[in-house]
Image (tube, coloured by chain):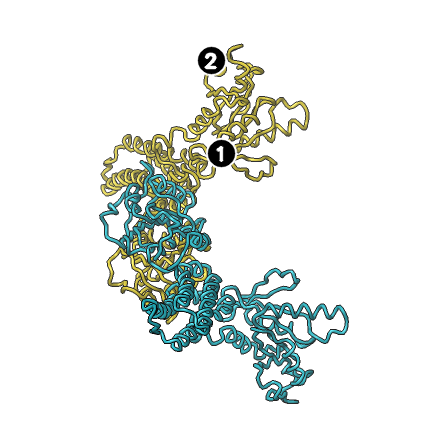
Chain colours: A yellow, B cyan
Amino acid sequence: MSKYTATDLSETIVALSTPQGVGAIGVIRMSGSAAIEICDEVFYGKKLSEQASHTLHFGTIRDGSIIVDEVVVALFKGPRSYTGENIVEVSFHGSPYILQKGLALLIRYGARLAKPGEFTMRAFLNGRMDLSQAEAVADLIASESEAAHGIAMQQMRGGFSNEITALREQLIHFASMIELELDFGEEDVEFANRADLIGLVQNIQKLIRNLLNSFELGNAIKHGVTTVIAGRPNAGKSTLLNAILNEDRAIVSDIAGTTRDTIEEVINIKGIQFRLIDTAGIRDAQDQIEAIGVQKTMETIRKSTILLYVFDVIALTPEEVAQDLQALQQDGLHILAVANKMDKNPYIEPYDFASEHLATTQIVSTSALNKMNIEHLQNQLYDLALQQQLSKGSTIISNARHYEALEKSNESLDNVLRGIDGGLSGELLAFDIKESLHYLGTISGEVTTEDLLGNIFGKFCIGK
Amino acid sequence: MSKYTATDLSETIVALSTPQGVGAIGVIRMSGSAAIEICDEVFYGKKLSEQASHTLHFGTIRDGSIIVDEVVVALFKGPRSYTGENIVEVSFHGSPYILQKGLALLIRYGARLAKPGEFTMRAFLNGRMDLSQAEAVADLIASESEAAHGIAMQQMRGGFSNEITALREQLIHFASMIELELDFGEEDVEFANRADLIGLVQNIQKLIRNLLNSFELGNAIKHGVTTVIAGRPNAGKSTLLNAILNEDRAIVSDIAGTTRDTIEEVINIKGIQFRLIDTAGIRDAQDQIEAIGVQKTMETIRKSTILLYVFDVIALTPEEVAQDLQALQQDGLHILAVANKMDKNPYIEPYDFASEHLATTQIVSTSALNKMNIEHLQNQLYDLALQQQLSKGSTIISNARHYEALEKSNESLDNVLRGIDGGLSGELLAFDIKESLHYLGTISGEVTTEDLLGNIFGKFCIGK
């Protein structure tokens, strides 16, 4: 691992690790080679440097003759610690005054205030976790739903790293075969069978593409899935919105509108947040003002992940529904059609869901008015958001940096394929393969720069 | 110790012990006979019930197959713990989402949410600290200055309890002598020499009075020392106020005025907060409006602990200063005279500080305009606030409940003295002595009621 140290590892760092404010307990964490010795200078109780790792010690922290607090010190000796270094965590009474005094005292005795994320950066630099795992720590702390928590936890526990490592290993094998050829320079041998190599690269690219495709979902789970409700006037859109929200009133909250003057309602379905946006009815734009309304709705749809297209089963024919769906379709937009007002329909004049026009459409029939089938609709929304990904336990990426690195790695592999196709020399093929390896390496932190580290850990809170 | 249990000690309680909000670490604390077993149900790592006390264990907290978090568990086995019971403290990542999940999980497995202060109440009920020590925990967490911190720390560490215990022991000795007499009922013996007893009671009352007297200071330290600046017009009061504040601009803040439309400025001098109040100039009230102004100033002075009387050394004679001081004097008010505008005076026409009129007055000479001697003035203010008390290391009480109990105990002792004087029977004397003992007992919690405990611990934060 290359060690671009954005931090001087010889220094001992200290920070308040619990949130600011008054509480029962406040924890000050100190990490570094001198952490235990510094604490021993101000801790009155057992001599910490003579105690075993992973033990707890009651005593007082003193500034000369003044007792700053009665505390419990948790002792972790490196490398069996979060950072891999010696760590002491001092549990003070949760008084901002006392914690300030405690911090100042430890700094006076030789520690320096930690920078944001510096504990976790040290964990990375000391090989306790790779970079994507370190990044997941921040995601985990920020997670606000079951799904976001699940993705961050999977990433922190190395699920994503394992996939990347597997990809890299295949590429390294590939590269070594090519390099073997170079050793035999003049002899025109081919250890790396080109057809096999093409198959291998294509395989790797397929895996990368799966990860790239998961990004949209991963990002949606992290920030909420934008779901727009659209349809012709009087299809029952607003009633449907209320029905969906009613089912979970306890976890509904209003979010101040965007510049479009819409109010987004947020609903949490089984751990995924959906941002529901109601729109004005869509109809053929017969005058200027209506045209603007339709344009606005279309803009909203373009920015959304899921479209709930609502139609009135009494008023629209399957053909009209199909026309609307075709007009609303966008690249990357998932459409769920909602056949509404079923309360007025089913036994009188059965709607032709099996019509050729609707054969490929996913339809849920509801009565928003009677709240019929609303729970089923929520389940469909949830499934749509998860697609097949989460349920299969496959890896989901939610980090733009990882997405970019995967994309660049993929481009390098495109070059490899083009090179093989064009009969490029092994030397040049090896160059593109190494570039691809480089980008994959930035994800796990095998390749890194001080800027990158500063950028990643600067977004952490202090004390982590 | 009487055990009026406001809490069912058989239940295991749990709470978030660190402040609400996002942070690096959030600690959930669980206490009770089943604390370790409940944690074992959801903790994957070593089996906690088989581990030694005061040890730390890394692992995961799981809800079925879902990993809630990677955690470190701190294990304390009773009675060597804060509450005297088994305690586990689980350090989660500081995500409100995760902490909520963790709390819910532990509750699902048999803990119940702790009430405010319930951990500390259990510490009291289990004899880990007396009641005044438990009360000091809340004071300690709320402390915002060095002095308030010092008083709370002294009290938490038992300094105050020791004084009370000493008083009680003397009284108990007293009572036992009296009771010995009762055993010999008819024989008219006096084991308790009345003259000796009077001396003893007087001695105890002196100690109680010292504690009672310390309350005003203790309370001032806890809430800030009200300091009023008064003097004749143009003495330089406002300039002096600014000069005092200027010296410590960094720790000055405005506090919204009271109904008197005054702005109080707060300054922290060596750890004690002073609430400085400027007033209109005092002069002989020649018309109705000015009389009202003077009346208001006098009211403000009545509510203050310290008066900074500012006078112009050019304009006023020692005799006039003495007259002003006499007019301003109040019971319990500490006056510091400030001879201002010394920049205009000293070498031209020396002011007669040794004048018989000023012989008993504490005077600081300043030039508010040139900020001359302002730091010395601050030191004098600090010393005045501390009087001789803190520096002597004597006990200071800051709790109204303790003040009341001491006062009632003192009244009972008055009755004892009156009883001896009036030749009251030993039986009746014993009654008053026991009443005095009772009130002292309420301070340390030897005597307590469920209401009292609820009242005290209800003011704590949850998790302490």
Q: Residue at x 65, y 83 (%)?
A: B313
Residue labelled with disc 2 = A354
- Which label lies toward us, 1 or 2? 1
In the rendered image, the residue lying farthest to the front is: B186
Residue A407 in the image: above or below residue B135: above
Label 1: how many residues lie within 10 Å, few (<14), some (14-19) or many (20+)? many
Query: Hey, what amino acid is under mark 2?
Result: Ala
Q: Position of residue B283 (x, y in %)?
A: 71, 75
* Left or right position of B74 against A114: left
Q: Which residue is mark 1?
A: A267
* Occupied quadrant, residue B177: bottom left
**Where residue B300 sits in the image (x, y, percent)?**
63, 68
A425 or B19, which lies in front? Answer: B19
Q: Residues within 10 Å of mark 2 (few under 14, many from 20)?
A: few
User: Who's the residue at 57% across and 84% down the image?
Assistant: B360
The x and y percentages for residue B142 are 46, 59
